[in-house]
Every structure is written in structure tokens, then in C-alpha cells.
Image (cartoon, rainbow, N blue to C red):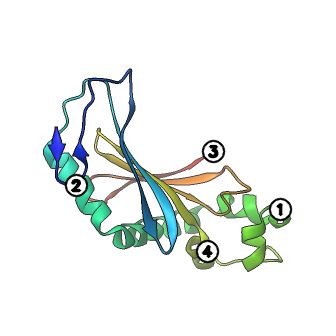
Amino acid sequence: MQHPYFGDLDTSDQDGTDVIWERDLELAGQPVDVALWANENQVLDPAQLDAFALLLEDLPELDAKARGFLTVELNEDDDFIAYHTDEVENFPALAAIAPDGEISIDEFVRALRLCNIGLWCDGTVVMDYQIDPDHSDQILAVKLDMQGGLKEVAWES
């Protein structure tokens, strides 16, 4: 299939679920790895691909929306922040902005780095945020629908 944003897409040559398109986008001067995932021989939905493309075309707006969801989630449960601030000395990027381990939720959310976006052909967009990607494998995954609505925020590693 040929798509105006994603180009030539083919699911016939893969075994199982795999990446069929990948690109590095830039957000606030940082690279963000974006991948489109599909199942073997999956028939791709052009409307779904169009919806994904619309979200990616305004990445700053999508990021702001996801950070809003993160702020709400961390106000309800700040264990992810505590995990990192309790041992702030192990996370240099966090220690640079909060040397004593004290940081507001808003400051923490602003400091999170968007590292990856997964576009899943079941209609899910997964945005992976990390506080110190070089020193922590802990991720806050913001899972959205194709319109950018929240499905869930999950702590993953």
C-alpha cells in the first residue's frame, strides 16, 4: 500500500508483528523514534494511517496533550517520581535539576523526555517518556487512541 505520509507499506514479508515504517522526528531539539507496527499480512486501514499522520504532523501539540495526562496521573500516584527522587544520585539528568530530590510534579513532567512513539495498527498510539534515558529503563507509557484521547498511563520498564 502507498500512503502519502508513510510511503510504501508492506506487511507480506514479515513474520509475526513487526515494524513496517520507522523515522526519527524531532521535538524540542531531541530525537524521537517513531515506529509503525503491524501484524503479518495485515490489511492496513488508510483512515487509520491518516489519523496517525495527523497526530504526528503536530507533534508538539500531541506531546503537550500527553504531558497533561501525565500530570493528572502523577498527581494521583507519584510512585514513579518517588522511585527516581529517592535515589536521585543515580539519575544525573534529574540530579541536575533537583539535586536534593525535591521537584514539583509540573517540573518533573516538563523534564521527562519523549523517547519513542509506537503506532499500533489496532489504533493505539504509545508515547514512551523517561526522566533519564541513559541511566533508567523506567518508562511512563501514555497510551492514546487515534484521536489523541487517553486510554491509559502505564509504568513500564
Q: Position of residue 137 (x, y in %)?
A: 67, 49
Which residue does the image show at 61% across and 73% down from the upper left? 111
Q: If the image is split into quadrants, where does the N terminus sit?
A: top left
Image: 37 above or below 113: above
Crowd tier of the residue under label 3, counting other residues whose Cα lies within 10 Å: few below 14, some 14–19, many 20 or above: few
Which tag is nearer the camera, tag 4 or tag 3? 3
Q: Secondary structure at mark 1?
A: loop
Image: 70 above or below 50: below
What's the residue type where badge 2 is placed? Tyr
Which residue is nearer to you in this view: 71 or 2? 2
Residue designated by label 1: 87
Q: CA distance from mark 4 to mark 1?
A: 17 Å
Mark 2 or mark 1: name the one nearer the start of the chain.
2
Q: Secondary structure at mark 4?
A: helix
**Residue 102 visible in the snapshot:** no
Residue designated by label 4: 105
What's the residue type where badge 4 is placed? Ile
What's the residue type where badge 1 is placed? Glu
Residue designated by label 2: 5
Which residue is nearer to you in this view: 138 or 104? 138
Residue designated by label 3: 157
